[in-house]
Amino acid sequence: MKKSLGPRTLAFPTPVWVVGTYDANRKPNVMTAAWGSICCSKPPCIGVSLRKATYSYGNIVAQGAFTISVPSETHVKEADYFGIVSGREVNKFDQAHLTPVASTLVDAPYVAEFPLVLECKLIHTIEIGLHTLFIGEILDVKADEAVLGEKGFPDIEKVRPIIFGPEIRSYHGIGRYLGQAFAIGKDL
Amino acid sequence: MKKSLGPRTLAFPTPVWVVGTYDANRKPNVMTAAWGSICCSKPPCIGVSLRKATYSYGNIVAQGAFTISVPSETHVKEADYFGIVSGREVNKFDQAHLTPVASTLVDAPYVAEFPLVLECKLIHTIEIGLHTLFIGEILDVKADEAVLGEKGFPDIEKVRPIIFGPEIRSYHGIGRYLGQAFAIGKDL
């Protein structure tokens, strides 16, 4: 028997991603978002939902572009900080001692120190309610050589992405390998 | 220096969620999706992207409803199986020896044996490309009593959700606790 918890934004896992944008003065900004996911394979797209009140919201609307930088768990404090303060008041890169890198593909910066980044061109804007969903076409994925594994793809155990638990508000690391997708279910 | 990997659906982490639907004959169906996320806080909404070719696609369009069941890592084989076969050919619940429960809130079934479920009413359909993004308003979240922790919310270390790595196609468990959100970044 399951217990009803009411209508809530409660699902596990959610990502901890850092959205990079430029403001009108070309000041780089970053904010942390957990409401995001890949949402199409062809063209490759990623969606991220932001509140209109955020500084990043206006930046994405104005520039038509954003990046997603995936922090490693070594930067969990910086990732949390990026979700607490507003780019209206501070330069978050400076405060966190992290380095903005200008994308050459879209008009947005990414975080040099984070191991995996996606450069995205805004293609859809969906007003849902408190949050607006921005869908970006992924023009390129870039990764640090140090996190690359077999077949040249990033190794998730080297990237060590952060997992967020909504409502319980906790961050977790990536855990043990459970098996290979589109494979282990065959011998059910 | 980062290495360019090209335009790809490559971001960590992605969830492993099971989408529950009914077909026209009320046969319950489930399919696994990794392209999904919470996408709005008010109203609480969750989005999941499916290919038009899937059996579940037509079911969601016809019923205007779906559920999300969050499998625990103990059911990783079943979750993988749900993404391999089609509900057109088989009854996946029967094959996996799992139990469909009819939602009383929306016209869709969820998986009794999975610890956390969301019941969703379709409110937006966005054609992106190969995938269509279905946005559902979360009408209720239900959880097994056994996974509830502090404050009555599900404990992520008891739910033990599965994390999927796109491209590398591997499943992982949840890892160690890293800290509290909206808190650990304050002493940066």
Image (cartoon, coloured by chain):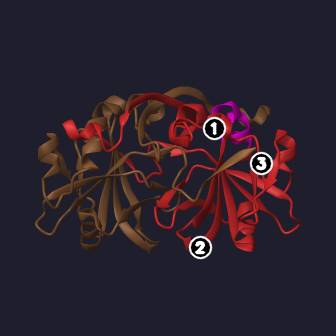
Chain colours: A brown, B red
Residue B178 visible to an observer of this rendering = yes
Residue B38's place in the image compared with B178, above or below, is below
Measured Cα–Cα span from mark 1 to mark 2: 30 Å
Quadrant for the N terminus of chain A in the image: top right
Quadrant for the C terminus of chain A in the image: top right
| Residue type, mark 3 in image | Val
Q: Are dots 1 and 2 on a single chain?
A: no
| Residue type, mark 2 in image | Ile
Circles 3 and 2, Cβ within 8 Å, touching? The answer is no
Span colored in magenta = B71-81
The residue furthest front is: B151
Residue linked to disc 1: A181
Tell me the tag on residue B85: 3
Can residue B75 be found in the magenta stretch?
Answer: yes
- Taking the spot 84% from the left edge, 69% from the top edge, the residue there is B24
| Residue type, mark 1 in image | Ala
Main secondary structure along the magenta-highlighted residues: helix
Give the mark, 3 or 2, whose residue is nearer the N terminus.
3
Q: Tell whether B36 sits left or right of A35.
A: right
Locate residue A103, reporting x and y percent.
23, 55
Subunit of label 2: B
Residue linked to disc 2: B123
**Residue nearest the observer in this picture, B161 or B92:** B161
Mark 1 lies on a secondary structure that is loop
